[in-house]
Image (cartoon, grey):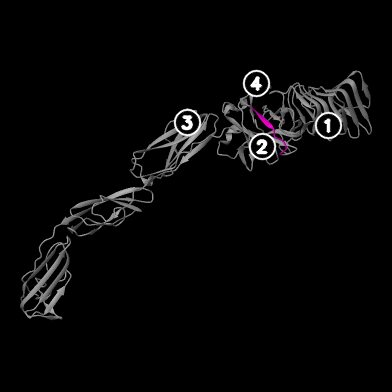
Amino acid sequence: MKKQILLIVLLIGSIIFVHAQNLQLMNYGANSKMTVKNVSVNIIGSLKNDANATIVNDGTIKLLDTSYATNFINNSDFVSVNNSNVKLEGAVQDIGGTKTTTFANLFIDGNDNKSISIKTNINENLNFVANKIIIDDYDLVLNANAVITNASKDRFIVTNGIVSPGSLVKKTWSTSDFRFPVGDAINSYKPVTIDNSLGVADTFSVRIESGLNPITDNNPACVQYTYVIQESNAGGSNAKLKLGWNNQDQGNLFIPQYASIWQYTVNAWHIALGNPQGFNANDPVNETQWVNKNMTTGITDFSSSSNKFILRSLRLNLLQPIDTAICFNSLDAITFSAGDTGGIIQYQWQKNCNNTGWINLVDDATYQGVTTADLLVYTQGILPSDNCKYQCVLTSLMGTSTTAPINFKIHPLPQILASQDTTVFIGQPAQLDASGGVSYLWVPSTYLDYSDIQNPISTPAENISYVVFVTDTNGCVNSDTITISVERTSEIFVPDAFSPNKDGQNDVLYVYGQGIKDIIFIIYDRWGEKVFETTDEKTGWDGTYKGKELSKATFVYYVKVTYWDGNMSEKKGNVTLVK
């Protein structure tokens, strides 16, 4: 059973040791009051101020036991007179109870870390002599004139709350800045400095959380911890913000010179307003394991919806490669470019054909400064059906990466359906035609009515070959060749006899000739009556008149032709119908 001492006494002008194994010094009973005045009370055990009792501290109270977990427990009124002290100099020790305690000066010392299990206030000084203080789920509040002494990378406030996260709370004045010596769950010192000189006096709460990664195109591994900063008068301050980063914890992936402060607003991470500064070697903290980033123009919004900040590497300023499409066999090679506009970047080009997976095309290459990485792709042998995709993976030395995809397509050439080679007589037009595209060009344009339409007409005076260039909707061009042969005209000829006896030989009388455009062919009997007439070169006389076969006789013919070259010819003669 734990031993307890009931003490209702005024302690003045002496050093008192209360010493017993696992002892608890209890101020107990209604209206009981313990006053410590100008005395140092050294307690080898816990101190408990029970309900309805009062402790007035006008001296120094020390909790010394380094062998047992001894606590400061306050369930009633604890009055801290100016310049009074409470020193936690034991092992694991906790400030708890049911009622908030306000200390004038609180000293963190002993051989292990301290904690608070209730909201705790400091009026004058939180003094670190050794170890840390953990404020998991309750706020540690520094009132208006309170300061923190001797905080360092080994002595700071661990803000590790999960259920109802606790923060370090401080009212800052508009004439000075304040460093919040906070750290994270792995005992890594990541202090926050708020310079409120640009705004009005305001109360800020600060803590470090782990496990929150930004939803961006960058590698989440580049961000390990989140700073949560809130102000009581949301939006009322224009504060400069410095975030400390313990580089030793993160290895060499985090390079301070290339980092920026990012703020979570409108459901996304954005670079915080203001101009980020680089590492400040003259910062007065005198620590070598962490660095600062400073927003010189201030952040105006520390509201509950915009209270999360991170230190992360600069977003890679990607020079996006241009999507490219070429026509089959149009180029031997094509160059893609991707890059960044600063820092040290590693490039890796990759290819994925027919969704078989990404493979590296070239060895990793490292560049520094304003750089680009080029990839020369030889297109010979790549078919339109290959469906190849390319991308460039850019990685900073901090491990942050982004991917620059490029859409690359090889279009097939247009399929041309062109008219066949043909033969015409001199002066005779030839209809040309091609299909398979949206635009056409015929070369040469000689003898053509139009050279840039789908179906031009050629009236050649000589043999000629045309090349038609067909362009499709993708801008791809294919070609075909059409040849026109030209023949000369000849004299007309009419046989002097024919035998329409239906034996399949010489049954019809025709006019023969080459290059005929128009014709008039008339047959008369011996009395001058017209028995046949045609204006069609391909229509001949079958020896009938008004549907009746005529008997053998001699007839007179008249023929007049106009040739394609414009010349004309007439001819008269006799023809015998033989039975």
Give me the residue at 70% from left, 37% from top.
302
Q: Amino acid at mark 3?
A: Thr
Q: Quadrant of residue 136?
A: top right
| Res 101 label | 1
Provide the residue designation for mark 3: 371
Give SS at disc 3.
Answer: strand
Per the model, the C-alpha gap separating discs 4 and 3 is 32 Å
**110 relative to 415 in the view: left or right:** right
Residue 240 on the magenta segment = yes
Provide the residue designation for mark 4: 282
* Dot 2 or dot 1, earlier in sequence: 1
Give me the residue at 85% from left, 32% from top.
74
| Res 63 label | none
* Dot 3 or dot 2, earlier in sequence: 2
Label 2 or label 1, whichever lies nearer to me, is: 2
Per the model, the C-alpha gap separating discs 2 and 1 is 29 Å
**34 relative to 86 in the view: left or right:** right
- How many numbered dots are placed on residues in this image? 4
Q: Amino acid at mark 2?
A: Lys
* Dot 1 or dot 3, earlier in sequence: 1
Per the model, the C-alpha gap separating discs 2 and 4 is 27 Å
Q: Residues within 10 Å of mark 4 (few under 14, many from 20)?
A: few
Give SS at disc 2.
Answer: strand
Q: Report the quarter where the C terminus lies.
A: bottom left
Provide the residue designation for mark 2: 308
State the image coordinates of residue 196 (x, y, percent, origin top left).
Answer: 72, 31
Report whether residue 509 is seen.
no
The answer to whether marks 1 and 3 mark residues whose Cβ atoms lie closer than 8 Å is no
Q: Quadrant of residue 186?
A: top right
Label 3 or label 2, whichever lies nearer to me, is: 3
Instruction: Relative to 489, say whether 220 is above or below.
Output: above
